[in-house]
Amino acid sequence: MKLLVTGATGFLGSTLLPLLREAGHETRALVRSGERLASADETVKGDVRDGASIREALDGIEGVYHLAGLVSRDPADARKMYELHVDGTRNLLDAANKAGVKRVVLASSSGTIGVSRTRRVATEDDDYPIETVGRWPYYLSKIYEEKIAIERAKQGLPVVILNPSLLLGPGDARMSSTQDVFRFLMGRIPVIPRGGISFVDVRDAARAFVAALTRGNVGERHLMGAANWEFHEFFARLGRIAHKPPPLMRMPSAMKVAAAHVLEKLARDRGREPDLPAADVEMGECWFFIDSSKAERLLGFRPRDPLETLSETVSYVREHFTASGAA
């Protein structure tokens, strides 16, 4: 099948492209820079926000992987995320429908479903947690993106939505998903968050994306996570792998969040980025636990040992982002 892949230069995209070619598909990567990608059969310059370039990129295409987006916890990026995730997705899906595309696989996030201020495990039957994520533009824009996709599926476009949790593993060249591991290695997480995290190896998620070209339920969401761990367990395991002590300090949630906002304001007033953005602290007080049984059943999703994922993430981040690779 001839496939268009948006977001091909990102963490998931760069992992997925070689797997699609191994499966015998012909790939066309849509990139904003026009940079030639060795992992794709063809590279075209374009932007999902530009209708003309999308229509041109879809010429002769049978299936679409829509991975393009921006992962940011900075409120200043809210408009850009809305344009990419909402306007861009609407442009792409409408053009794909007119082009008669046989399948669209949309990369969403488990954060459109599995975010709670209390400890619980979410499933695809849960409603959008808008009251919880309403202050975080990334998750809010991804919710709007999903709603567009589900509506287009009802109108006849065969869209399948995949919702991986935090992507970890080697290869995150932009550190879009592995920032928290970097911060831990650099000693920038002083206090244990109250909540819990779900994560998945990007390589296992990519294999499920390959399967979604022919499997999975149209117009529905499919959660994927390898582990649901309290943050104290996550950092304890990370500490043993990295041979670094985990944060031990504990504080009431309200105090943590208030202190984070004060420190962030001080950092920005001085013209620099905060070591730990306040939004990250707020998220750490929530639980991101999810049930992946639907993806296991319908997509053959099989996560590897999460300790293997953590170990290889630490090795990659150290090699590429910490001084001398030995932090």
Image (tube, rainbow, N blue to C red):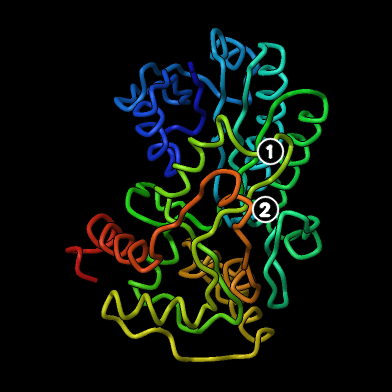
Residue drawn 41% across the image and 75% down it: 188
Quadrant of residue 60 within the rendered picture: top right
Reply above or below: 58 against 239.
Answer: above
Secondary structure under tag 2 reads helix
Q: Nearer the viewer, residue 96 or 227?
A: 227
Tell me how far mark 1 sits from mark 2, CA to CA.
22 Å
Residue 221 horizontal/vertical position (percent)? 69, 45
**In-image side of 284 versus 156 (left or right):** left
Q: Which callout, 1 or 2, points to the residue nearer the camera?
A: 1
Residue 73 horizontal/vertical position (percent)? 58, 57
Q: Nearer the viewer, residue 115 or 63?
A: 63
- Of the 4 image quadrants, the one containing the C terminus is bottom left
Reply above or below: 44 against 139.
Answer: above
Residue drawn 76% across the image and 65% down it: 132
Reply above or below: 177 against 184.
Answer: above
Q: Amino acid at mark 1?
A: Asn
Q: Nearer the viewer, residue 242 or 200?
A: 200
Residue 111 horizontal/vertical position (percent)? 65, 57
Residue drawn 38% across the image and 40% down it: 15
Tell me the number on the disc at residue 217.
Answer: 1
Residue drawn 69% across the image and 26% down it: 158
Pick whichever of labels 1 and 2 is earlier in the sequence: 2
Quadrant of residue 110 within the rendered picture: bottom right
**In-image side of 188 versus 113 (left or right):** left
Quadrant of residue 234 within the rendered picture: bottom left
| In contact (CB < 8 Å): disc 1 and disc 2 | no
Q: Amino acid at mark 2?
A: Tyr
Reply above or below: 183 against 167.
Answer: below
Residue 108 horizontal/vertical position (percent)? 62, 45
Secondary structure under tag 1 reads loop
- In the picture of the structure, the residue carrying the numbered disc 2 is 139
